Amino acid sequence: MQTSLSAATAGRLRMPGGLEVNRLGFGAMRITGDGIWGPPRDKAEALRVLRRAVELGVQLIDTADSYGPGVSEELIAEALYPYPNGVVIATKGGLTRPGPDEWRRNAQPSYLKSACEASLKRLRVGCIDLYQLHSPDPAVPYADSIGALAQLQKEGKIRHIGVSNVNVGELKLARSLVNVASVQNRFNFNDRYSEDVLRACEEDGIAFLPWGPLTAGRFRMTPAPLKKIGERTGGTTKQVLLAWLLGRSPVMLPIPGTSSVAHLEENVGAAALRLTPEEIEELG
């Protein structure tokens, strides 16, 4: 589907703290090399993807210092700096990378502060629009990790704070310490484990960024309804899955990622699909 190819057609979301963006973003993890490690095979295409995303009305670009590591942030700056008005660069800290497809948690306050400083340099900014704690670290009291972000915000290095991979209790604790603008948890057609976190976000208008929004390899139900809805709307399966997320909650802000301009345009095309309440209910 190529009609009304603009992320803006998904509507807008105003987060706590006043940050407002179009409700379909872009996840910049896949613009790195294999295993989310090193530079991409086709750097020129990666840069085209980032620039095309902004052309299509994407305003929230989500990344992390661990993507590459560092590579995704560097590519974003190379492609988009100076950043156009309205474009929000959201990054994360709290995971380290010993090698391809390997992830380790480190949410020590001292590490988060140094990670944030490094992200500021790679992104070429003095203040990060949205900085997210990538994951709770069992070795560190969660309040200490959130406290480090609060200090960075006080110093003017972070404008808004987000959390990721949290449960309801962790979200509640974070909110007792800072104003949480967003939550980023895994959520898609197959994986709805964070349903309770989504509901908690809805209560106060906190943006919910579902990572892995298109992971639907083994369907939890027959894919027949997806095919039927796709035929009616003229949308692809991926577009129907994204439209389902958008229709499921007013605080949902999907961030599908890709290293291909063609796939990017397919994803953004989902913003024009309007599923009926009956279709959303049918898909669950």
Image: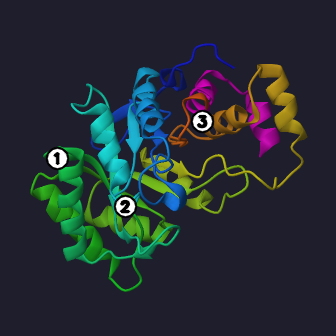
Image quarter (top left, top right, bottom left or bottom right) of the N terminus: top right
Disc 1 on helix, strand or loop? Answer: loop
Reading the image, the residue beneath label 3 is 246
Residue pictured at 50% horizontal, 25% vertical: 7
Q: Earlier in the sequence, mark 2 or mark 3?
A: 2
User: As shown in the figure, which amino acid type bears the numbered disc 1?
Assistant: Cys
How far apart in space, not on screen, are marks 3 and 1 (Cα)? Answer: 29 Å
Reading the image, the residue beneath label 2 is 69
Reading the image, the residue beneath label 1 is 127
Q: Give the crowd class for mark 3: few <14, some 14-19, many >=20 residues within 10 Å.
A: many
In screen coordinates, is 61 left or right of 241? Answer: left
x, y percent for residue 262: 60, 28
- The magenta span reads 263-284
In screen coordinates, is 218 left or right of 40? Answer: right
Residue 126 lies, with reference to residue 153, above or below; the image says above
Residue 67 lies, with reference to residue 6, above or below; the image says below
User: As shown in the figure, which amino acid type bears the numbered disc 2?
Assistant: Pro
Instruction: Name the foreground residue: 39 vs 14.
Output: 39
